[in-house]
Amino acid sequence: MRVGDAARQVGTSARMLRYAEQLGLVNPPRTGGGYRHYGERDLRAAALALELQARYGVTPAALAFGLRALEDPEAAGSLRRLAALRATGPSGPGTALDFETAKARRLLRLAS
Amino acid sequence: MRVGDAARQVGTSARMLRYAEQLGLVNPPRTGGGYRHYGERDLRAAALALELQARYGVTPAALAFGLRALEDPEAAGSLRRLAALRATGPSGPGTALDFETAKARRLLRLAS
DNA sequence: GCAACCTTGACAAGAAATTGTGAAGGTTTG
DNA sequence: CAAACCTTCACAATTTCTTGTCAAGGTTGC
């Protein structure tokens, strides 16, 4: 199946299928003449890519980076370090007062 | 350390630090008055986020989705399915002729 | 209490990604 | 061989993301 029909099948444009390929989201083989040939798997990959973009509200490029996060160990490592740092720091309970509690306290003080 | 100083430390703007927080890239605790309080870890998270954006040439949003790919099992699962489909289909060698080879063959045919 | 900073929210400027379209030419299939 | 499709490339339209800025008000620390 060629790119035009594939696009109709999955509900997008041929242009977008080529763009998705450039981003590494799909990878259809080529015929001897250079035509993209979409098989069953390629169609499902394209359809899934579109569905995930919608489900997670992300761009094609973000989806591609998500794939990289899972496949490239170096990227995965960096991201895990970020994930570890991002979690609220070494501050135990009591380091920062609870916002609402403090606000209520202020209001009480004003009211008295 | 408050957001303004933190921004100067890591070489960005206060606006961007808030945006990064909104995307889930950093998560500084708050003071009783609601001020963001950047500790050592928060500063390093912010700096690392910026560095990874540059290193991988991705947007803050893509970076955030990369984190999700590693942390959210459902997202990870979907992405792995995509990764599996994306690999060149069930076509063994011979299913699609090599492009360059075929082209050379055509040229030879023309030349004869 | 005051200066300097912060908060959220909204709007708008700017940059970048996404998508369309056309040109020049090659492939496929009947 | 001819119609219909494809290729890549480049440019442009669009949309979205990113970033700045302002307003109205609250916090902090001297």
Image (cartoon, coloured by chain):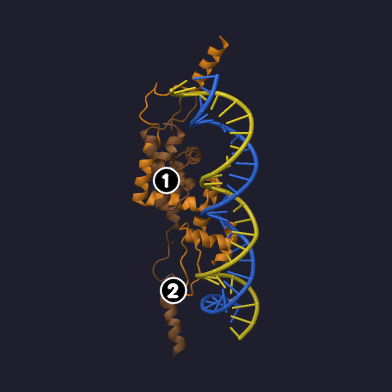
Chain colours: A orange, B brown, C blue, D yellow
Tag 2: residue type? Answer: Phe
Q: Relative to residue A3, is residue B53 drawn left or right? A: left
What x and y, as percent, mark residue C27?
Answer: 51, 76
What x and y, as percent, mark residue C4?
Answer: 49, 31
Density class for disc 1 (Cα within 10 Å; few <14, some 14-19, many ≥20) is: many
Density class for disc 2 (Cα within 10 Å; few <14, some 14-19, many ≥20) is: some
What x and y, as percent, mark residue A96?
Answer: 42, 24
- Res. A105 mark: none
- Res. B99 mark: 2
Residue at image mark 1: B50
What x and y, as percent, mark residue B56?
Answer: 41, 52
Residue drawn at point x = 46 percent, y = 61 percent: A27
Tag 1: residue type? Answer: Leu
Residue drawn at point x = 55 percent, y = 60 percent: A16
Q: The N terminus of chain A is located in which quarter? A: bottom right
Instruction: Name the residue at the top extreme.
Output: A112
Say if B111 sits above or below D30 in the image. below
- Residue B80 visible in the current orientation: no
Letter of the chain that mark 2 sits on in the rendering: B
- Label 2 residue SS: helix
Please state which of the two labelled residues, at mark 1 or mark 2, is closer to the viewer.
Answer: 1
Where residue B94 sits, quadrant-wise, is: bottom left
Q: What whole-number distance in Å separates the C-alpha atoms at marks 1 and 2?
A: 41 Å
Q: Earlier in the sequence, mark 1 or mark 2?
A: 1
Q: Is A31 or A69 nearer to us in this picture? A: A69
Instruction: Name the residue at the bottom extreme.
Output: B112
- Residue A17 visible in the current orientation: yes
Q: The C terminus of chain A is located in which quarter? A: top right
Say if B17 sits above or below D4 in the image. above
Letter of the chain that mark 1 sits on in the rendering: B
Q: Are marks 1 and 2 in contact (CB under 8 Å)?
A: no
